[in-house]
Image (tube, grey):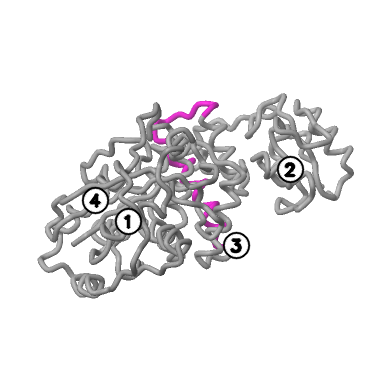
Amino acid sequence: MYAVIDTETTGLLPTHRHRIIEIAVVLLDARGRVEREWVTLLNPQRDLGPQHIHGILTADVLAAPEFRDIARQLGELLAGRMVVGHNVEFDLGFLRAEFARLGVTVPLITERSMCTMALAGYLHPGAKRTLGACCAAAGISIEGWHSALADTRATAELFAQYLGAFAAPPPWQWAYEEVRRLPWPDLPGTDVAPTVRPVHAGGRHGWMSRLVDQLPRVPEPPQADSYLVLLDTILGKREITAADADQLVQVATELGMTRPQVDHLHRWYVSALATASWGTGEISPDQRSDLDRVAVMLGQRVSDVDEALLRVSAGRYVVPDRPGARGYPPGSTLVFTGDMVEPREVWWDRAVAAGFVPQEAVRPDTTFLVAADVDSLSVKARAAREFNIPIISADDFRRFLPEDQRKAG
């Protein structure tokens, strides 16, 4: 009756030629009992994107089938079943795009699917957003590091619990009856055997991952949780690159969110991360540096982190006030781009006085770029994005400087 799915992908946007690189399906009967499991890696015929998130190596997919090879097998698993997923629209969007590349349209309809993230909020007001947090609240463990099969098994177990909260038949039975009758097209494919990923070192239990599992839901705008769960996933391994940040902006656009809405969510997110980080009553310099980097990459100020930590600690947190302590250490290299109110030489001298090392051109080892406009299309800004180098505003850079260097521009 149900097909629980999860995918690992090369990025966040199927409309930008990102591809599925792993897919898992767990079939459940009407009572939520497991009938069958199926999983395979896929060769996307492109780079694998954020490997620090999904943990899949190029060597893992070289001999894996392409999507067209498994399309028929996958269609047979999904046809006539209601699809279930955690933030299911993300997975459905990628599946629709993959089938569309083969010239076929499949009846994978978001409004006729079930999302455990949405169900968690409905059944348990105050429930957190991430799969890890929802499973922890339900006493379900996830074994595996962003493995599609591990996440699908956990989602299936979570859905089975939720299913038990409703009398039979469940309130969505009418939608299932519609799905069961939807015809599927003839699909290409072979009898190729699935390729299962090898086990690599790593885990989903880093400091930042534990933080994002504590973050609450955001009711407004309606697309907020769908957007933020992707941000949660990126931060699960502590890192967020300039490419990640750019993709998030594009995801927000496709979700129909305005720039002020996104900026509001980013401000809330940075504050919520900082608040969650004070749970132990202390924060290390490395952890503070992580928070600062996230704030800057999301277009926020490190002073927002200061304010959140001071608020949650009731003033006990000691704000660092040494050169470079707010985001990047002394010795970090930087490049300036764009016309600022004050002459470039003034900014250059301030950077040197604060212990930074200015450069004339962006290089792969440049630490960050300071721009008059963070959306700049200058040669330096384009090079920074190509090298995944953070781009920050002049106002944010000013906050990295010692007090006597923060002159109004």
Q: Answer with mark 4 or mark 3, whichever residue precedes in sequence.
A: 4
Q: Residue at x 34, y 50 (%)?
A: 6
Q: Answer with mark 2 or mark 1, whichever residue precedes in sequence.
A: 1
The x, y position of residue 204, in whole percent, is 38, 35
Residue at the spot of label 1: 117
Residue at the spot of label 3: 259
Image label count: 4
Tell me the distance, in whole angstroms, between the alpha carbons under discs 3 and 1: 24 Å
The numbered dot on residue 338 is: none
Foreground: disc 2 or disc 4: 4
Tell me the distance, in whole angstroms, between the alpha carbons under discs 2 and 3: 24 Å
Residue at the spot of label 2: 383
Q: Is residue 409 magenta?
A: no
At label 1, counting other C-alpha atoms closer than 10 Å, the crowd grade (few under 14, some 14-19, many 20 or more) is: many
- Whether residue 318 is situated above or below residue 384 in the rendered picture: above
Residue at the spot of label 4: 26
